[in-house]
Amino acid sequence: MELKDLKGLGRVRLEALNKAGILSLTDLLMTLPRAYRDTSVITPIAEIQEGQPCCISGYLKDKPKLAHFRGISRVTATICDESGKLPLIWYNQPWMKDQLSDEELLLLFGKPERNKAGKLMMNSPRREKERALIPEYAPPAGFPAKVFADLIQQALSELEACCPETLPQSIRMQYHLCERNFALRQIHAPENPEMLTLAQRRLAFEQLLLYQAALSILRGTPGNAIPIAHKENDIQRFWQAFPYPPTGAQSRVLKEILTDMQQPTAMRRMVQGDVGCGKTAIAMGAIYISARAGKQSALMAPTEILARQHFESAQKLLEPLGVKCGLLLGGMKAKERREALAAIANGDWQLVIGTHALLSEGVVYQNLALAVTDEQHRFGVRQRQLLSQKALGDREPHVLVMSATPIPRTLALILYGDLELSVVDELPPGRTPVKTRIVPERKRDGLYSFVKEQAAAGRQTYIVCPLVEESEMINAVSAQEMYADLVNGPLSSLRIGLTYGAQDAMEKEKTLAAFSAGDIDVLVSTTVIEVGVNVPNATVMIIENADRFGLSQLHQLRGRVGRGAEESWCFLMAEPNERLTTLCSTNDGFVIARKDLEMRGPGEFLGTRQHGDSMFAGMQMDAPLIEETQKCIRTLEKDPARAEDLSLIQASARVLFQAHLKQVALN
């Protein structure tokens, strides 16, 4: 049987599945439930808690009532058990009045919440028919959840034929893992919580192990590189030229990089650290040592404005040390570009800074030995090949990647398994922490008054929105809507700009440059400003619908302010909750990342690597499991006696992550 043979799957629905990446019965069965409704446990009404989904059972106090108000229907009832009673309400479901009887024992599942009077109630609880663990799926857009669940149950009948085992028996025995088909059957139709836990562990272990095997394949064997030797007094001379002494972490990480660069194999290292930890200074140190050895370096930035900022910083720091710096941008005039290409080719520029223009045809380096890049422009296989062609002979350049996204180390080793990892876990002294506050909607007018006070004092504000344009499907503020409201409303006296990801590139650069130059008081944007602009004069960050963002992303956005000497603020527009309170209590990105990992789980972090199509969706993972799978794959790679097991796992990894490997290679 094939996917198209399932009952209830016409052409339109089949296309919807294919568009979501579900091309086979195997893909369908590997689409795991996002959650489970546990109707096997009944919670007494007296013990239910606000916001905690639960199953209740009882009789209705009276017959349900149907009312209409301004075109909206409302069915109300009250359910009672031996411990108490609970109001129920269903909006725009008038049929519920006839489906509920006060003479029948009801089984209902829902999330208790408080009404305007402050009393607990349930809004639109589901009527359940069985006491079980019932899977809940996130089907493709426009696909009814009930139909999708039925397709899964049909596919289970073909489980043995379409889902072969991926792990050798020796590994299953060693790590106490059940068979794959047993796990898939229990995931989609669990017998009990214990069996579900066994199944979740097995599939999470498999995905993590195979993903690491896929990264190992992608990593391959590092190519030959130009060894770059250094002297201790060269490092000392660099740090002495710096405006402040290095932190212990900066000194340690630069030494790790320089040790790699001395080797005849190409370095592939990521430097990860919090906003303001001094990663760029470390990169400049590596560039200086490369120049001292008579070699060229390239530094690639995600935007032209950030490339210009890097260029200005490099000129101030490196040119007094004898390192000639140059800038190569895609938007250069023909004469400027010719002069830049000549300076690169003849070695006049020892450091070339730019955007992706650094990789374009016609750029010929005299002796490129070090490439430094930003996480957003992480070098994949194809880009390394392009750079290799620009290096000397068959030599690859050493590659250094900078990441300003703090991630717990175990997770970073999975996300960036094809790179060695250095962590800058110390901030330079003297930085003024950004003050973070949660602002409910009722205090918005006061916040706008504060923004105007800041503008009058010559300081600037970011306002970040989760959407580009208004959406009927998502209840959140859009950048375009916010811009229009502010220009014609409370901030009409200020100079306001607008930028977002899909904006025309030249218009975006123009807007960001104007903000950087101080010609815009308030910049309304999406998260496009998360990576990129360094504006020391910006002292206020306002994040709309802050509860829609992950903690780590909120921390990244907050890092756009607090870059100058002035006191800076980050305002989170939302009602208070545990996540946002955590952000207010600390400016330590690694503490925040650990909390984010704890609350969201590794699956969400790992899923973002698939460009919206999460390969770990529904997986139950934790740090110990990540470490366990890391240890497993490293052991297999080092033990010649386990070559057959490693070969089987790599074959499974190629099949499972074929599309992902291709995507990473091209990035």
Image (cartoon, helix red, strand yellow):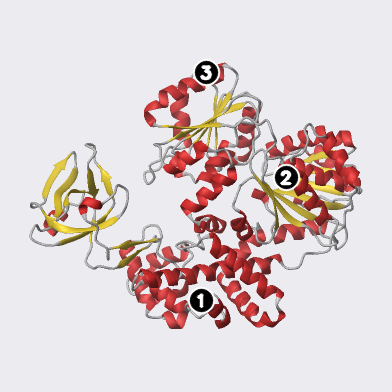
Estimate the x, y position of residue 212 in percent, counting from the top left: 62, 66
Picture quadrant where residue 134 is located: bottom left
Residue with the mark numbered 2: 249
Confirm whether residue 468 shows in the render. Answer: no
Query: Residue at horizontal 78%, vertical 52%?
Result: 256
Estimate the x, y position of residue 386 in percent, counting from the top left: 76, 58
Counting residues from the N terminus, which is met first, the one under dot 1 or under dot 2?
1
State the residue in front, 462 or 604.
Answer: 604
Estimate the x, y position of residue 603 in percent, counting from the top left: 50, 59
Quarter the N terminus occupies: bottom left
Residues at marks 2 and 3, CA–CA distance in whole angstroms: 38 Å
- Looking at the rendered image, the disc whose residue lies closer to the viewer, 1 or 3, is 1
Q: Report the amino acid beneath label 1.
A: His
Picture quadrant where residue 521 is located: top right
Query: Residue at horizontal 45%, vertical 83%?
Result: 161
Residue 176's tag is 1
Residue with the mark numbered 3: 453
Marks 1 & 3, CB-CB < 8 Å contact: no
Q: Secondary structure at mark 1?
A: loop
Q: Report the amino acid beneath label 3.
A: Glu
Residue 392's tag is none
**Rendered view: 581 above or below 186:** above
State the residue in front, 407 or 146.
Answer: 407
State the residue in front, 111 or 13.
Answer: 111
